Image: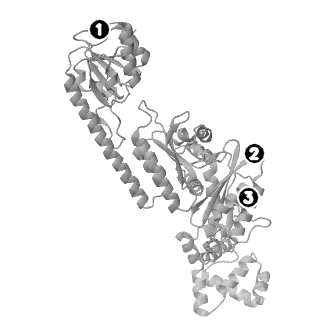
C-alpha cells in the first residue's frame, strides 16, 4: 500500500521572519521549488520524514550510489540502473538509508511509469522518503537551483552566527545582568529559556510562544528527569537543550532551552550557539554582579507579584512554585520591613535579604524575601493551615530589629489564596507608610498591623496631600501667626484644652496656669479663630488640625 500525497507549498525563504534562526533546507522545501513542482512530484513513502534536512543533491544512474554519498543528499535518478530483482532493490534502498540519504526522487518517464512495488516496500520499511516525478525534469537545473539555495542558506547561517556572537559580546561589555542575558537568548532563539540553580529552582524564565505556567509547572520534577552534563547537550524526556553555567570548575547552575511546540526540528546549530553564548554571558554576569541569583530572583518575583504584572494567577503560582515556595494548602502573609539606611550600612557584611532568608530557612518557614524599594524589604510567608502566623512574624520582626533597631515592621492580613497576596502587601505597605518615626510599638508586639493605624497615623500617611496641609493651615494658621507676632503661647493652651477633652480645670493644671489666666487665653483663642470652643464639633476639627500640624512637622 502506497502513501500517495500531493506536495503542499512550503514557505519560501523570503517568507521567513528574518529575526528567526535560519532553518536548514528540508525535503519539503525542495519539493516546493518551481523547478521540481513542474515535474508533478508525489510523495509515495516517508511523508512523516519530509522535515529531513537536505545537505546536497546527487544525480546518479549507478547501482551502488551509496559509496559516493556522505549523508543528507537528495538522490535524483531516472530509475534506469535500478536492479530488476526485489533483493537487489532492497539492497539498493538499504545502502541509501544506511548512509543517511535525505530522500530518493525517481522520474517515471523512461523506464517506469509507476514505482515498482519492491521499491515502495523497501523505502517504506526503511522510512526513506520516495518521491516520484510524473513529468520530465532537468536534473542539472534542479542541482543548480538547490545548490544555490543550500549555499545561500549556509552563508546566512554564518552571518546569523556572527550576529549572535556580536550581540552577546555587546551584552557582556555593557555589564548586562542575568535577566537581560536570558531575555536576549529567548528573543534570538525563539525558544523558552530558563536559568536554574543547583537545586533545580527556576530563577529566571523567559517564555517564547508559551506561558510561564506551561513552561514552569512541575519544573523541579521535570528538571531532575533531565540529566546534567559537562557541556551543551540535548536530553531528558522533553528533549531540553541544556548547558552548565560554571567558572573554573565551580558550577552555579545551568541554562535550559525548551523545544518549541511545532513540527520543526527541536534545535539546530544556531540554537546550540545561542545557548553556549548564553552560558558564557551568564558566567560573566555572575562575576560582575555579586548579588546571588536567588536574591535577585526572589526580589523580581515579589515585585511582579505585588504590582500584579503576571499575565494570569496560574503564571504567578507556577513561578513561585518553581522558586521553591509551596502554594498548595498554604496561607499567605505579607510582611514589610522599612530599614533606615544608616542602620544597614553600618554592617555591610550582613545583607538584610540574605540574613532574613537564612533566619526563615533555619526556622523552617517557607518564604520569599526581596527588596521592594530602596530601604523597604518585602517578605511573603507561606504557612500551612496548622501553623499560626504570630510566632513566625515575631521571629521575623526580632531578626529585623537585630539588624536595624529603628526598623518598622508591618504586617498585612492573611490571604487564603495567592491571588490575595498583593492585597496583603498593600495593607502592610499602608501600615508602614502611616507609621511616624517616633510612634511607639504596641504593647507586647514588635510589629504593627492595620488595627494600629489611628488618626495620627492616618494623617501621617496623608501628610504630603496638599488638602491636609491646607486644612491644618486654615484651622490653625491665624493662631500660629498671633503667637509669632505677640510672643504668646496660645497654641500650647489649645493643645492642653483639647487633650483634656474640654475640661478647663484639668487643662489649666496641665498648662501650669491659674483658672482665670487659662479662661482668658481661651477667650482670646476663640476671638482669633472665630470659633466656639464649647462646640464638640469645632473641638474635633481643631484636634484633627492640631494632629495634622504635628505630623507635618515630623522629619
Which percent across, then down, holds residue 219? 59, 41
Dot 3, how many residues are within 10 Å of its Cα: few (below 14), some (14-19), or many (20+)?
many
Which percent across, then down, holds residue 124? 41, 15
Q: CA distance from mark 3 to mark 1?
A: 81 Å
Check disc 1 and report the residue beneath it: 114
Residue mark closest to the camera, 3 vs 1: 1
Task: Find numbered disc 1 in the image and state the secondary structure of the residue it sits on.
Answer: loop
**Closest to the observer, 96 or 443:** 96
Res 7 seen here: no
Dot 2, how many residues are within 10 Å of its Cα: few (below 14), some (14-19), or many (20+)?
few
Task: Find numbered disc 3 in the image and state the secondary structure of the residue it sits on.
Answer: helix
- Say whether residue 306 is left or right of residue 504: left
Q: Residue at x 30, y 42 (%)?
A: 156
Check disc 2 and report the residue beneath it: 385
Which percent across, then down, holds residue 468? 57, 70
Q: Where residue 393 is drawn, which disc sits there?
A: 3
Dot 1, how many residues are within 10 Å of its Cα: few (below 14), some (14-19), or many (20+)?
few
Res 395 seen here: yes
Report which quarter residue 505 is drawn in.
bottom right
> Which numbered disc, 2 or 1, marks the residue that appears first in the sequence?
1
> Which numbered disc, 3 or 2, marks the residue that appears first in the sequence?
2
Rendered view: 324 above or below 377: above
Task: Find numbered disc 2 in the image and state the secondary structure of the residue it sits on.
Answer: loop
Q: Where residue 43 is drawn, which disc sits there?
A: none
Q: Residue at x 69, y 69 (%)?
A: 403
Q: CA distance from mark 2 to mark 1?
A: 73 Å
Q: Residue at x 55, y 70 (%)?
A: 464
**Closest to the observer, 481 or 341:** 341
Image marks 2 and 1: residues in contact by CB distance under 8 Å: no
Amino acid at each position: 500500500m502506497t502513501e500517495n500525497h500531493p506536495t503542499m507549498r512550503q514557505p519560501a525563504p523570503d517568507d521567513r521572519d528574518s529575526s528567526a534562526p535560519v532553518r536548514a533546507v528540508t525535503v519539503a522545501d525542495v519539493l516546493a521549488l518551481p523547478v521540481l513542482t513542474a515535474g508533478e512530484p508525489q510523495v509515495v513513502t516517508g511523508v512523516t520524514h519530509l522535515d529531513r534536512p537536505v545537505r546536497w543533491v546527487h544525480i546518479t544512474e549507478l547501482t551502488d550510489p551509496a559509496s559516493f554519498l556522505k549523508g543528507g543528499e537528495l538522490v535524483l535518478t531516472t530509475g534506469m540502473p535500478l536492479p530488476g530483482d526485489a533483493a537487489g532493490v532492497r539492497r539498493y534502498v538499504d545502502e541509501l538509508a544506511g548512509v543517511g540519504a535525505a530522500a530518493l526522487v525517481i522520474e517515471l518517464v523512461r523506464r517506469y511509469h509507476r514505482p515498482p512495488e519492491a521499491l515502495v516496500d523497501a523505502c517504506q520499511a526503511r522510512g526513506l522518503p520516495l518521491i516520484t516525478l510524473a513529468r520530465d525534469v532537468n536534473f542539472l537545473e534542479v542541482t543548480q537551483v538547490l545548490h544555490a539555495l543550500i549555499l545561500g542558506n549556509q552563508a546566512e547561517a554564518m552571518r546569523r552566527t556572527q550576529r549572535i556572537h556580536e550581540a552577546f559580546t555587546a551584552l557582556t561589555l555593557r555589564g548586562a545582568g542575568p535577566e537581560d542575558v536570558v531575555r536576549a537568548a529567548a528573543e534570538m532563539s525563539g525558544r523558552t529559556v530558563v536559568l536554574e540553580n543547583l537545586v533545580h529552582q527556576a530563577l529566571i524564565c523567559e517564555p517564547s510562544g508559551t506561558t510561564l505556567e506551561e513552561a514552569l509547572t512541575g519544573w523541579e520534577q521535570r528538571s531532575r528527569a533531565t540529566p546534567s552534563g559537562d557541556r551543551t547537550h540535548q536530553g531528558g524526556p522533553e528533549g531540553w537543550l541544556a548547558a552548565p553555567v560554571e567558572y573554573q570548575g565551580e558550577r552555579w547552575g545551568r541554562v535550559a532551552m525548551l523545544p518549541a511546540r511545532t513540527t520543526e526540528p527541536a534545535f539546530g546549530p544556531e540554537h546550540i550557539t545561542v545557548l553556549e553564548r548564553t552560558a558564557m554571558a551568564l558566567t560573566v554576569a555572575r562575576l560582575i554582579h555579586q548579588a546571588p541569583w536567588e536574591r535577585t530572583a526572589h526580589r523580581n518575583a515579589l515585585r511582579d507579584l505585588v504590582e500584579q504584572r503576571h499575565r494570569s494567577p496560574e503564571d504567578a503560582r507556577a513561578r513561585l512554585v518553581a522558586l521553591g515556595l509551596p502554594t498548595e494548602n498554604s496561607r499567605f502573609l505579607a510582611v514589610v520591613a522599612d530599614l533606615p539606611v544608616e542602620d544597614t550600612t553600618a554592617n555591610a557584611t550582613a545583607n538584610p535579604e540574605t540574613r532574613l532568608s537564612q533566619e526563615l530557612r533555619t526556622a523552617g518557614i517557607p518564604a520569599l524575601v526581596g527588596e521592594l524599594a530602596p530601604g523597604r524589604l518585602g517578605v511573603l510567608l507561606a504557612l500551612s493551615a496548622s501553623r499560626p502566623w504570630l510566632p513566625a512574624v515575631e521571629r521575623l520582626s526580632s531578626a529585623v530589629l537585630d539588624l536595624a533597631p529603628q526598623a518598622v515592621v508591618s504586617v498585612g492580613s492573611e490571604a487564603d489564596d495567592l491571588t490575595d497576596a498583593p492585597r496583603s502587601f498593600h495593607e502592610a505597605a499602608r501600615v508602614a507608610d502611616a507609621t511616624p518615626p517616633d510612634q511607639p510599638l504596641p504593647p507586647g508586639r514588635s510589629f504593627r498591623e492595620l488595627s494600629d493605624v489611628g488618626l495620627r497615623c492616618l494623617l501621617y500617611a496623608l501628610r504630603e496631600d496638599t488638602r491636609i496641609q491646607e486644612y491644618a493651615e486654615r484651622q490653625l494658621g491665624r493662631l500660629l501667626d498671633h503667637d509669632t507676632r505677640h510672643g504668646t503661647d496660645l497654641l500650647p493652651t489649645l493643645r492642653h484644652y483639647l487633650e483634656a477633652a474640654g475640661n478647663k480645670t484639668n487643662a489649666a493644671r496641665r498648662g501650669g496656669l491659674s483658672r482665670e489666666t487659662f479662661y482668658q487665653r481661651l477667650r482670646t483663642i476663640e476671638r482669633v479663630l472665630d470659633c466656639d470652643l464649647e462646640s464638640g464639633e469645632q473641638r474635633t476639627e481643631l484636634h484633627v488640625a492640631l494632629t495634622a500640624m504635628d505630623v507635618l512637622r515630623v522629619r
